[in-house]
Image: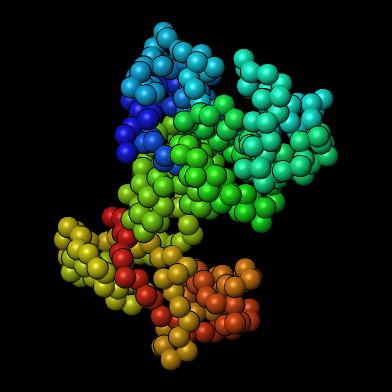
Amino acid sequence: MTTLLEIIEIECRYQKSTVVQSLSMHVKHNSLVSLLGPSGCGKTTALRAIAGLEPIYHGQIKLRDEVVSRPGFTRPPEKRQLAMVFQDYALFPHMDVTSNVAFGVRNVSKKIQGKMADEMLEIVGLSNMGDRYPHELSGGQQQRVALARALITKPDLILLDEPFSNLDIDLRERLSLDVRDILKERGVSGILVTHDQNEAFAICDQIGVMNKGKIEQWDTPFNLYHDPVNRFVADFIGQGVFLKGTFTSPDTVETEIGTIKGDRAYKFSKDTNVDLLVRPDDIVPDQESDLKAEVIQKAFKGAEILYTLKLSSGNKIYSLVPSHQNYEIGELIGIKPVLEHLVTFQQ
């Protein structure tokens, strides 16, 4: 796939404060990516710079091999052939759904506008709702209208700024998967800005984890979870704890939960002290095990239960198990570590 968008070492500022620095990334045609990070990390500012709503003070933004932003020059948003979907939907309350969707269409008759809007509404699952007004729709339906309005202009890049954050969890998950399918079917690339990693994982092929205006790691969801490059990414992605350990060989760490042998070798010398990342799926109940832990908290998640366990040292770990394995608070259970892939950081 060829590159649609290329961002080269950009810097963005608010007054004298630098909020995005040395940020580089690229988006290929028909690719969905995410800028993921905590509030205040600069991800929305970066998205606004891509849209042409913010100037840059260093670097370049290239769209279809043309420079659209550089210091002292910002091509206006309407001349970038992209679309944006906002967190608050930004629908016109005095217009019906058809008029909202057709708003961006120019130089065609009202009849053709209406036909194009109807086609878009069918794509997003809102057929026969064109005569309704925004206040008559649910939040999920309003977001679908906003998506239809963005798609009607036939952009090859769509920018999604926390588009599902106002929706309840179940609807957010369903709609995010629907949006992915729609964009993939139409060959539209997308950049999703979110603080919700589950959302990013469900939609995106590649994710950039941002912190303090920089991308800490640009990778697939699988690699971010199983092979984080630093402590920030390891902490931010998924759940887990760090347990102290000591390398006894390049692929083996001695810890309080036993000797852990992984599937790759580190360059740490023997007796190096490290922190070992232990995820909830790394710990499984095993009543035959001599290693015991006390159940101090449990969170029922339907098919699974997330247990918080206390080791004899007082340290806490998590265990995610099928919900038919139901243990009580205060119960002492046998556990077994099943870490196949070591993720360690030197102390």
Could you tell whether 156 is left or right of 129 in the image? left
Q: Quadrant of residue 73?
A: top left
Q: Quadrant of residue 337?
A: bottom left
Nearer-the-camera pick, 121 or 315: 121
Q: Is residue 52 above or below residue 247?
A: above
Locate residue 302, reporting x and y percent.
63, 71
Residue drawn 59% across and 77% down? 323
Could you tell whether 282 is left or right of 54 in the image? left
Residue drawn 42% across and 39% down? 30
Nearer-the-camera pick, 186 or 160: 186
Residue 34 visible to the viewer: no
Which quarter of the figure is the N terminus placed in?
A: top left
Locate residue 14, reporting x and y percent.
52, 18
Locate residue 49, reporting x and y percent.
48, 22
Residue drawn 33% across and 77% down? 258
Residue drawn 36% across and 36% down? 28
Q: Please, which residue is most extreme toward the bottom here?
A: 288
Could you tell whether 26 is left or right of 319 in the image? left
Could you tell whether 89 is left or right of 196 in the image? right
Locate residue 252, reporting x and y percent.
23, 70
Q: Is residue 225 above or below residue 184?
A: below
Residue 76 visible to the viewer: yes
Which quarter of the figure is the C terminus placed in?
A: bottom left
